[in-house]
């Protein structure tokens, strides 16, 4: 397993992270097995959120025997200080831990969210107080908007940003370069989502109709294409990537991560061709 340092924290994370969605809707004994297997294979970065179904209920007990050796990240979708505090305490209890290594604002999308969390009574008040209390070590956010992500990086010294960095959105949708540049400028660690995403499910596809029900997008199933996509993402200065939420893709990501050579010119041309033929999940507005 390759490990990379997260921004300026000094923390070394496995390049592949374990997303809590992997253990949602999973019996506890199976969740325990999956987590123990991941740790045995060198994974030390785990990420969860209250909005991921029963992920905290499953991941907390499964991770308890391994807690001291892993980097545990959690999130809150609450934008106000009171709500963020309540969600933080709930997550700590469910995850059977006294602190999170990384606590993140979840799914920052609108500039209104940015103003709220950074303003009086906003969630950042809870984040800063919790850091002083030792309940969280590092502060970060996840975002699905380049505008919101860049604004947050410019207005507060976050330790990390978790962002969809995907070959197609990056090359075809111009969605991501701005955030990578801002994070590097500010010294924030970069964590990636959607590295193995292909495109949206066909319009009208219900959750029950999806082949991969835990993914709201269509993942890349072809092994060679998935390898090109993940290597592209991890070549952007990314510390670690979280694969789609099915164990099959987590296993595939670990396999791909055994050879993370930079893309050669022929491979880069191939991924550019694939991007041009694919509809991006996200685009930056012109």
Image (cartoon, rainbow, N blue to C red):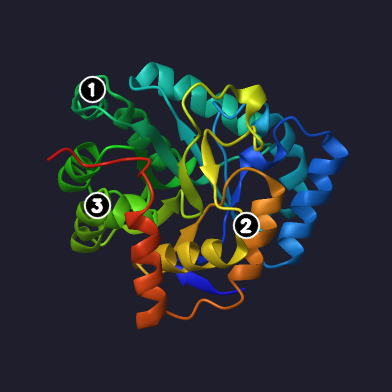
Check the picture and name the quadrant holding the C terminus. Answer: top left
Residue under label 1, please give it. Answer: 116
Distance, label 2 to label 3, CA atoms, is 27 Å
Q: Which of the 4 quarters of the picture holds residue 55? A: top right
Q: Is residue 180 above or below residue 97?
A: below
Q: Is residue 148 above or below residue 15?
A: above
Q: Answer with left or right where residue 60 lies relative to residue 237.
A: right
- Mark 1 touching mark 2, by CB under 8 A? no
Q: Nearer the viewer, mark 1 or mark 3?
A: 3
- Please give the name of the residue rendered at 58% of the width and 30% of the height, measured from the top-left corner: 52
Q: Which residue is nearer to you in this view: 235 or 200? A: 200
Which is nearer the N-term, disc 1 or disc 3?
Answer: 1
- Please give the name of the residue rendered at 50% of the width and 34% of the height, measured from the top-left corner: 201
Q: Answer with left or right where residue 42 lies relative to residue 72.
A: right
Q: Secondary structure at mark 2?
A: loop
Q: Answer with left or right where residue 7 lies relative to residue 50.
A: left
Crowding around mark 1 (Cα neighbors within 10 Å: few <14, some 14 to 19, many 20+) is some
Residue under label 2, please give it. Answer: 70
Q: Is residue 254 above or below residue 209?
A: below
Q: Which of the 4 quarters of the picture holds residue 9? A: bottom left
Please provide percent x and percent y for residue 142: 38, 41
Crowding around mark 2 (Cα neighbors within 10 Å: few <14, some 14 to 19, many 20+) is some
Q: Which of the 4 quarters of the picture holds residue 245? A: top right
């Amino acid at each position: 397993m390759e490990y990379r340092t997260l921004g300026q924290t000094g923390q070394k994370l496995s390049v592949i992270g374990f997303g809590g969605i992997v253990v949602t809707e999973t019996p506890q004994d199976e969740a325990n097995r999956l987590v123990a297997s991941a740790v045995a294979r060198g994974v030390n970065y785990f990420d969860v959120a209250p909005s991921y179904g029963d992920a905290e209920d499953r991941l907390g007990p499964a991770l308890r025997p391994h807690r001291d050796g892993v980097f545990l990240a959690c999130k809150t979708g609450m934008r106000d200080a009171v709500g963020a505090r309540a969600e933080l305490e709930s997550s700590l209890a469910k995850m059977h831990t006294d602190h999170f290594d990384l606590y993140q604002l979840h799914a920052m999308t609108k500039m209104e969210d940015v103003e709220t969390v950074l303003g009086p009574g906003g969630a950042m008040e809870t984040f800063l107080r919790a850091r002083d209390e030792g309940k969280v070590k590092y502060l970060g956010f996840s975002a699905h908007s380049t505008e919101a992500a860049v604004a947050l990086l410019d207005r507060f010294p976050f330790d990390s940003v978790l962002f969809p960095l995907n070959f197609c959105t990056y090359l075809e949708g111009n969605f991501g370069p701005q955030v990578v540049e801002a994070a590097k400028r500010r010294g924030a660690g970069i964590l990636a989502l959607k590295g193995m995403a292909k495109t949206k499910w066909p319009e009208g596809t219900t959750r029950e109709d999806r082949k991969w029900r835990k993914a709201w997008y269509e993942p890349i199933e072809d092994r060679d294409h998935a390898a090109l996509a993940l290597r592209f993402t991890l070549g952007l200065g990314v510390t670690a990537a979280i694969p789609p939420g099915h164990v099959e893709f987590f296993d595939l990501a670990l396999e791909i991560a055994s050879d993370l050579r930079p893309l050669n010119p022929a491979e880069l041309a191939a991924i550019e061709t694939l991007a041009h033929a694919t509809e991006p999940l996200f685009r930056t507005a012109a």
